[in-house]
Amino acid sequence: MTIRALCVYCGSSSQVRPSHLEAARELGTLAARAAVDIVYGGGRVGMMGAVAAGAQAAGGRVVGIIPQHLEDLEAGNRSATEYLVVDSMHARKQLMAERSDAFCALPGGLGTLDEAFEIITWRQLKLHDKPIIFVNLEGFWDPLLRLVEHQTAEGYLRGGSAGLFHVVERVDQVLEAAANAPRPSLPDKIERM
Ligand code: AMP
């Protein structure tokens, strides 16, 4: 499938491994080179800021979507190609989902988990079938992937995670994984969430 806009969920903390920040920046650069827009949470901090900086430095389009009350805390990226200020966290997630053809999760904290799992559960509930990719940088997501295996073994996840999300190890595999995913066939009901 053709990817025009990639949603990136990732951490807002800057106190993380330099290799993760470098990878985030590289993903932005790769997206820009492939003429894929980055849709993200609109901040200039941490992994979020690194993705956006990588894309913007390489001439890419960046769509930042931020709730008004977080503009200071997350250093709103007013130089984004599109800087969209919304009223709530829910509006942010919904607009990020609407504006994107595929989703990926780089390492992050609780907010990243919330965002990634919301889009996964929307897929599980057949509200959309756009591809979702965990970028397991240096095994960062291994504990989470073990938990999902455990949930599957215990009967809480019928069919396992294979139909819900993909896992790649490096940022240079993200766009290919998204492009190789089956073309979405469900009517997209995200805007009705
Ligand atoms: P974190 O992974 O905790 O650093 O958070 C990453 C991003 O997720 C930050 O921009 C947070 O503002 C955002 N975030 C946290 N919780 C939510 C939520 N419930 N809905 C939307 N965005 C969220």
Image (cartoon, helix red, strand yellow):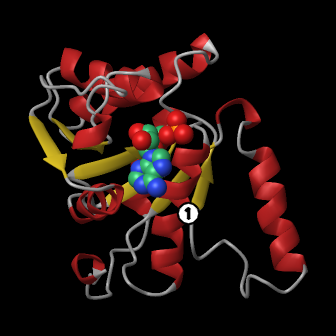
Q: Residue furthest front?
A: 69
On screen, 166 above or below 153?
above
For the C terminus, which image quadrant? bottom left
Q: State the image coordinates of residue 140 (x, y, percent, origin top left).
A: 72, 36
Q: State the image coordinates of residue 97 (x, y, percent, origin top left).
A: 30, 62
On screen, 58 above or below 51?
above
For the N terminus, which image quadrant? bottom left
Q: Does the rendering let one see residue 176?
A: no
Residue 145 position by quadrant: bottom right
Tell me how many marks there are.
Answer: 1
On screen, 169 above or below 4?
above
10 Å crowding of disc 1: few (<14), some (14-19), many (20+): few
Q: Does the rendering let one see residue 7?
A: yes
Q: Nearer the viewer, residue 15 or 171?
A: 15
From the viewer's perspective, tell me whether residue 161 is left or right of residue 154.
Answer: left
Q: Nearer the viewer, residue 101 or 94?
A: 94
Residue 16 position by quadrant: top right
Residue 34 position by quadrant: top left
Residue at 75% across, 53% down: 144
Q: State the image coordinates of residue 159 (x, y, percent, origin top left).
A: 71, 85
Residue at 54% across, 56% down: 114
Residue of label 1: 117
Cβ(mark 1) to ligand 1 < 8 Å?
A: no
Residue at 20% across, 21% down: 56
Q: State the image coordinates of residue 77 (x, y, percent, origin top left).
A: 21, 25
From the viewer's perspective, tell me whether residue 35 is left or right of residue 171.
Answer: left
**Residue type indicated by callout 1:** Phe
Q: Nearer the viewer, residue 88 or 189?
A: 88
Residue at 18% across, 51% down: 86
Q: Residue furthest top?
A: 18
SS at mark 1 in the image: helix
